Amino acid sequence: MQTSPIEVQKALKDMDYPASKEKLIQHAKKHSASKEVMQVLDELPDKEYTNAADVSREFSGK
């Protein structure tokens, strides 16, 4: 099953940016993100994300 950018953004609600990939994953875990969302975050490039749109750009197409 795939997930949508909307589901990813819901899991990252109230995230403080900029944030590393690791911080995104920790935040999503704390907010009980689905297995699919966690997989998407795990596959993101290991870099600093400046905002939610930055995360969405990396996620689009997956």
Image: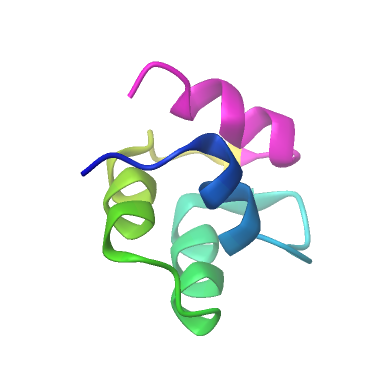
Place of residue 43 in the rendered image (x, y in percent of width and height, measured from the top left): 28, 40
Residue at position x 57%, y 62% from top? Answer: 11
Residue at position x 44%, y 76% from top? Answer: 29
Q: Is residue 10 in the magenta section?
A: no
Name the foreground residue: 30 vs 48.
30
Q: Quadrant of residue 22?
A: bottom left
Place of residue 59 in the rendered image (x, y in percent of width and height, measured from the top left): 46, 29
Place of residue 56 in the rendered image (x, y in percent of width and height, measured from the top left): 59, 30
Place of residue 25 in the rendered image (x, y in percent of width and height, measured from the top left): 44, 63
Residue at position x 40%, y 40% from top? Answer: 46
Q: Quadrant of residue 55?
A: top right
> Which quadrant is the C terminus positioned in?
top left
Please state if 11 lies on the left or on the right of 35 as rendered.
Answer: right
Name the foreground residue: 2 vs 49.
2
Report how many numbered discs are placed on residues in the image: 0
Residue closest to the far top: 61
Q: Is residue 55 in the magenta section?
A: yes
Q: Quadrant of residue 1?
A: top left
Work out whether 33 lies above or below 6: below
Q: How is the image coloured?
A: rainbow
Q: Which residues are magenta?
A: 49-62
Residue at position x 46%, y 79% from top? Answer: 32
Name the foreground residue: 50 vs 15.
15
